Image (cartoon, helix red, strand yellow):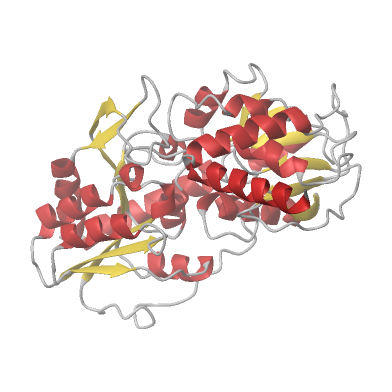
Amino acid sequence: MIPIKAAALRLGHGLWRQLPQDFRRRGMSGLAATLARKPDRPGPSRSNGIVVAGDVAGANGLAESARIMHEVIAAHGLARGLLPLGLPSVVPTTPADVPGDAALLAVLNAPILPVGLLRLRRDFIAGRRVIGMWAWELPVLPGDWRYGARFVHEIWAPSQFTADAVEVLAPGAVRVVPYPLAALPAMEVEGDRDSFNLPADVLVVLTIFNLASSMARKNPLGNIAAFKAAFGARKDCLFVLKVSGSEVYREDLKIIEAAIAGAANIRLISETLPEPQLRGLIAASDIVMSLHRSEGFGLVPATAMLLGRPVVATGWSGNLTFMTEETSALIDYRLIPVVDPRGNYDLRNAQWAEPDVEDAAVWLKRLGDDSGLRQSMGEAGRRHAQGAIGAGPVLAALAANGIA
């Protein structure tokens, strides 16, 4: 009987793996939401600091967001631990040795939260205040986000754009708390043009994106088209595309390589770089471009502005948290129905932006030919970002939740 049972389990697992990944994740989230313990309601009015949880060692935007939140909260003496939390296939299991009276800030998106909590001991959230910090890139939400709403007392959104989308899940319990990059105790920067093998005497335009975050959403082809329209084959201009996730999304990489079409003034960097080196690459560039179709926040443009680099970006979605027409080059766009070959964003009635490549090319050429404009826009952006994404909203949100 045992071999038959083992064979049946293997068969069942094999059939499960044949199902679409998105379907499997929805099923996993729904099952976990049924099995995992819900937080006590009402939650405690006072907490002894806060534990920050998420994919804390990952090389992606949400992981970096968790680290940023923890570092800033720790600088104000309120951090009580950094806890790995997420999907079994992504985040390793780690014993949760954190104070029982500390609140929990879960910097992972709603469908993953019940799965992560189910991996912890069942009494972990007993008597604990739970806050979800969620980022989303469209005005409408997938249906499985409702699962995570059962496990939080409050939701923090990094932008008003995201907050407007998630408000339907928890009316009156959503707070805008931008990622406090400007409040980092030290924004470590490593590297210069020599270390990245970039010529000293050329204009460098940089785009950074992760293919795991959806190539359709990040829109590298639009960025390439804008650079070509602005500078053609000019040898004194170099476009650097820093892409991660290419080892998994090889077909996407082939499409990007075809769009580059052997252009001598476009360079592709695909190796993974730690955050200090990514900042170094930004600092070594003259212009940072993000012709995204949507962003929940926009860590790369925000970092570029704090480093004093002028940013050319789509004038829509979460990046408007820290970007204005006076401090950056916001590109015209039109809203179009979402078409995402991977299906992550294919939601009924969903729209995102189609940035105007010609407008982007005009801005690139203006900035490229005018070093004074680059300097003045970079400085204006730096000053504005320092005020827009500082520690104030985080500290106010902690105080409002009784976290001291």
User: Residue 31, located in which quarter of the rendered image?
Assistant: top right
Task: Pick out the residue farthest to the front.
Answer: 1
2 left or right of 354 in image: right
Q: Quadrant of the C terminus?
A: top right
Between residue 85 and residue 383, name the one nearer to us.
85
Between residue 108 and residue 307, name the one nearer to us.
108
Between residue 24 and residue 326, name the one nearer to us.
24
User: Residue 338, located in which quarter of the rendered image?
Assistant: top left
Label count reads 0
Give above or below for 194 relative to 98: below
The percent coordinates of residue 362 (x first, y second) are 14, 47
User: Residue 157, located in which quarter of the rendered image?
Assistant: top right
The percent coordinates of residue 26 (x first, y second) are 57, 33
Give above or below for 104 relative to 242: above
Name the residue rendered at 26%, 27% in the picture.
Answer: 336
Give above or below for 320 relative to 240: above
Between residue 186 and residue 361, name the one nearer to us.
361
- Looking at the image, can residue 201 be seen? yes
Name the residue rendered at 68%, 22% in the picture.
Answer: 173
Task: Pick out the residue farthest to the left.
Answer: 233
The percent coordinates of residue 55 (x first, y second) are 63, 53
230 left or right of 328 in image: left
318 left or right of 57 in image: left
368 left or right of 165 in image: left
The percent coordinates of residue 116 (x first, y second) are 71, 44
Give above or below for 224 relative to 186: above
- Looking at the image, can residue 135 be seen? no
